[in-house]
Image (spheres, rainbow, N blue to C red):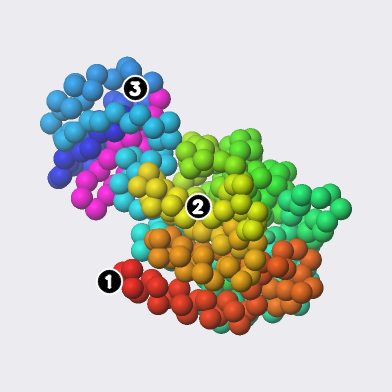
């Protein structure tokens, strides 16, 4: 249930109402928007008589919220959430450009790529250290050492960094990581989501290979429910019967998510297509569809990459793409 408060409600009146709602055993989510304040009520709202609530002088309207995701819902928070980390912003008109290698491989590799993507306009550096590989015999990442090398690249360039976590016991290794990624395979690792909900880290939550938009929102709700609303959603392609691309990029999820949630949405065309030839057009399409950012894999030597070389752009290709993304964004802003 949500209660929209009238204009010019005093802070004292607001606090009084909120403490009454809390005394009824409800969790109250407050969203102070440009035009009005929305109180989102979570818990057993059956205890509250909606007509009584609506009759209060400071309340403009009361509406039920039927969606099972509440804190992520745009009904609870009508304005776009803007997520800012280390100078990069996503949402509410801000576009983030995340680029970097699939995996951190060496100091030289990650620092060189970091400097080159930064020069091209990237705002966040990506780099996997704990890699969820389909085969146990494939390169599994440099783990803690990889995170250290990523931190060094952060220091050298000033770019904030994003890297994937696979289990909560590793959290302390992620202290210097600005954005913790939950990969597609862990989107429904509910224990991990709950634990990250208790932190104040920004989370990049990728959509699972075979998950619906609603399931993605429910996973985000697990994180929000613990009190952490610093979440960026990521579409990275879903599995369909198509085999000529690695996955099928579901770009329609961008406007759908914008309708349903206040959280920013980024698109990863690299894992979606699996082929560097298709990445630029899908990245531009994502920008045109209103995404709040993109995440692209970039490697300085794709032929010798230890992971996902086929889908990695070179720094030069990335620079060209970054320029075109700016042009597309200008067109859609008109
Ligand atoms: C990644 O971004 O490195 C990754 C493994 O992506 P996904 O979880 O989308 O497969
Ligand atoms: Mn990859």
Identify which residue is drawn at 33% across, 68% down. Answer: 332
- Taking the image in four quarters, ligand 2 sits in the one at bottom right
Of mark 2 and mark 1, the one earlier in the sequence is 2
Label 1 to label 3, Cα distance in Å?
43 Å
**14 with respect to 230 (left or right):** left
Q: Quadrant of residue 288?
A: bottom left
**16 with respect to 113 (left or right):** left
User: How many numbered marks does the figure carry?
Assistant: 3
Q: Nearer the viewer, residue 118 or 265?
A: 265
Name the secondary structure under disc 3. Answer: helix
Which mark is drawn over residue 159? none
**Residue depth check, mark 2 versus mark 1: number of the one nearer the observer:** 2
Q: Quadrant of the image for the C terminus?
A: bottom left
- Circle 1 is placed at which residue position? 334
Name the secondary structure under disc 1. Answer: loop
The outermost residue toward the right is 137
- Tell me: residue 265, above or below residue 87: above
What percent of the width, then of the height, locates residue 256? 39, 48
- Circle 3 is placed at which residue position? 45
């Amino acid at each position: 249930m949500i209660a929209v408060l009238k204009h010019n409600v005093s802070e004292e009146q607001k606090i009084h109402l909120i403490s009454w709602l809390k005394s009824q055993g409800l969790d109250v989510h407050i969203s102070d928007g440009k035009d009005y304040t929305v109180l989102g009520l979570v818990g057993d709202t059956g205890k509250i008589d909606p007509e009584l609530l609506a009759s209060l002088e400071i309340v403009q309207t009361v509406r039920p919220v039927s969606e099972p995701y509440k804190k992520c819902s745009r009904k609870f928070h009508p304005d776009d959430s803007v997520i800012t980390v280390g100078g990069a912003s996503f949402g509410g008109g801000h576009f983030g450009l995340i680029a970097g290698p699939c995996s951190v491989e060496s100091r030289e590799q990650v620092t060189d790529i970091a400097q080159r993507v930064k020069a091209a306009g990237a705002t966040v550096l990506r780099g996997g250290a704990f890699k969820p590989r389909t085969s146990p015999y494939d390169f599994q990442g440099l783990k803690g050492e990889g995170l250290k090398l990523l931190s060094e690249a952060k220091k050298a360039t000033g770019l904030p960094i994003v890297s994937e976590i696979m289990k909560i016991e590793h959290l302390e290794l992620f202290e210097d990581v600005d954005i913790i990624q939950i990969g597609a395979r862990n989107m429904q690792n509910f224990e991990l989501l709950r634990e990250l909900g208790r932190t104040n880290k920004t989370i990049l939550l990728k959509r699972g290979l075979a998950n619906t938009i609603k399931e993605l929102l429910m996973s985000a709700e697990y994180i929000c429910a613990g009190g952490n609303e610093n979440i960026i959603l990521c579409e990275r392609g879903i599995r369909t019967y198509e085999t000529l691309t690695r996955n099928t990029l579901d770009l329609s999820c961008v406007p759908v998510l914008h309708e349903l949630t206040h959280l920013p949405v980024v698109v990863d065309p690299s894992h979606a297509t699996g082929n560097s030839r298709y990445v630029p057009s899908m990245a531009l399409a994502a920008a045109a569809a209103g995404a709040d950012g993109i995440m692209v894999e970039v490697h300085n030597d794709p032929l010798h990459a230890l992971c996902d070389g086929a889908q990695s752009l070179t720094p030069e290709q990335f620079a060209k793409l970054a320029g075109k993304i700016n042009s597309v964004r200008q067109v859609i802003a008109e």
